[in-house]
Image (cartoon, rainbow, N blue to C red):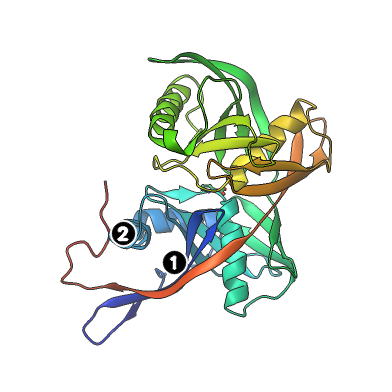
């Protein structure tokens, strides 16, 4: 990490938001991870430098909703960068809104121009396209539905049916429920989805870390969602990996055809446009494509003063 004369460590970051969901890209001063495959670098980050994750995204510099993106040297020779996404409690496999924020940040810094760019993530390579109008589309990692309409007994709520699906992170997707996906209801929706997540984890799917509720779209989309993230914050964007997981379920159930557009709205009313291509129809594996926009909101220098008891962030 970079240090000043008084041994205060400094990190340069660029903040953006994608459909209301923030991303903080660390462009200088990151932890000295040893090169290697990205999953190994995530292990190093977690075991040796987790305080750095907390310093970047947790209070007092960040908040529960902030997603961090650490740039690391790519492993694929053609990739523009490697990236490790992280949040208030840990590390993400992939992050769709974060990828859109990262692309807009790299363009803002003059590091990329319009066109296709390969990014390495811990769960595989992702191709992202910066469009001339500033929009970004990404072809996410291969996605699939693992289990359909699993019934989970949720204490206090009764049986809840949902699909378990991979879109770069693991999701439990609930279509049929009585709750209104309204911004005024986020506390209640958070409580409900947290209970669902605990029950899903205990009843056979320990890997699920995100829960997604759906309702009909209200702002011109095919569907609106509420997505609970692993650290109990809800996604302000429609969630790129969540929309990928949704596309995998739609594809598997024959409700959406290859290349047919799907507009996914978030609880805020922001939207992503998605479609998919089959990679393996027999196995139900798709390549989801997600398009959205992001805006740079800040360029700043974080200071980690050795006298500050909260320099590594407030960890719960
Ligand atoms: O857009 O994939 C996403 C995402 C995951 C967690 C927050 N956003």
| SS for callout 2 | helix
Q: Is residue 136 left or right of residue 229?
A: right
Residue nearer the viewer, 31 or 23: 23
**Quarter location, residue 105:** bottom right
Residue nearer the viewer, 202 or 229: 229
Q: Position of residue 236 (x, y in %)?
A: 50, 47
Q: Position of residue 201 (x, y in %)?
A: 45, 26
Mark-to-mark CA distance, 2 and 1: 14 Å
Q: Which image quarter is the N terminus in?
A: bottom left
**Quarter location, residue 133:** bottom right
* Label 2 sits on residue: 51
| SS for callout 1 | loop
Q: Is residue 136 left or right of residue 298?
A: right
Q: Position of residue 66 (x, y in %)?
A: 42, 55
- Vertical comparison of 211 with 302: above or below: above
* Label 1 sits on residue: 33
Dot 2 and dot 1 residues touching (CB under 8 Å): no
Q: Residue furthest bottom?
A: 5
Q: Using a 10 Å C-alpha cutoff, classify the residue at mark 1 as few (fewer than 14 neighbours), some (14 to 19) or many (20 or more).
A: some
Q: Is residue 122 visible?
A: no
- Vertical comparison of 180 with 68: above or below: above
């Amino acid at each position: 990490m970079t240090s000043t004369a008084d041994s205060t460590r400094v990190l340069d970051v660029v903040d953006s938001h994608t459909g209301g969901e923030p991303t903080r890209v660390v462009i200088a001063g990151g932890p000295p991870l040893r090169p290697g495959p990205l999953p190994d670098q995530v292990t190093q980050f977690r075991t040796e430098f987790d305080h750095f994750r907390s310093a970047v995204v947790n209070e007092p510099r960040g908040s529960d909703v902030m997603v961090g993106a650490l740039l690391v040297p790519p492993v694929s020779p053609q990739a523009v960068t490697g990236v490790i996404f992280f949040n208030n409690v840990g590390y993400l496999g992939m992050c769709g809104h974060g990828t859109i924020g990262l692309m807009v940040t790299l363009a803002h810094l003059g590091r990329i121009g319009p066109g296709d760019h390969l990014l390495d993530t811990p769960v595989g390579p992702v191709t992202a396209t910066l469009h001339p109008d500033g929009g970004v589309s990404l072809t996410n990692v291969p996605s699939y539905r693992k289990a359909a309409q699993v019934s989970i007994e949720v204490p206090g709520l009764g049986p809840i049916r949902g699909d378990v699906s991979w879109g770069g992170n693991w999701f439990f997707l609930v279509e049929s429920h009585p709750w209104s996906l309204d911004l005024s209801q986020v506390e209640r929706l958070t409580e409900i989805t947290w209970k669902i997540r605990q029950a899903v984890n205990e009843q056979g799917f320990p890997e699920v870390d995100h829960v997604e509720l759906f309702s009909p779209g209200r702002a011109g989309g095919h569907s609106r969602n509420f997505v609970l993230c692993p650290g109990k914050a809800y996604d302000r964007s429609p969630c790129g990996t969540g929309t990928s997981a949704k596309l995998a379920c739609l594809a598997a159930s024959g409700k959406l055809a290859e290349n047919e557009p799907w507009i996914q709205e978030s609880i805020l009313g922001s939207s992503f446009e998605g479609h998919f291509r089959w990679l393996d129809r027999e196995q139900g594996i798709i390549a989801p494509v997600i398009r959205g926009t992001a805006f740079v909101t800040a360029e700043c220098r974080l200071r980690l003063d050795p006298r500050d008891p909260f320099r590594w962030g407030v960890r719960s």
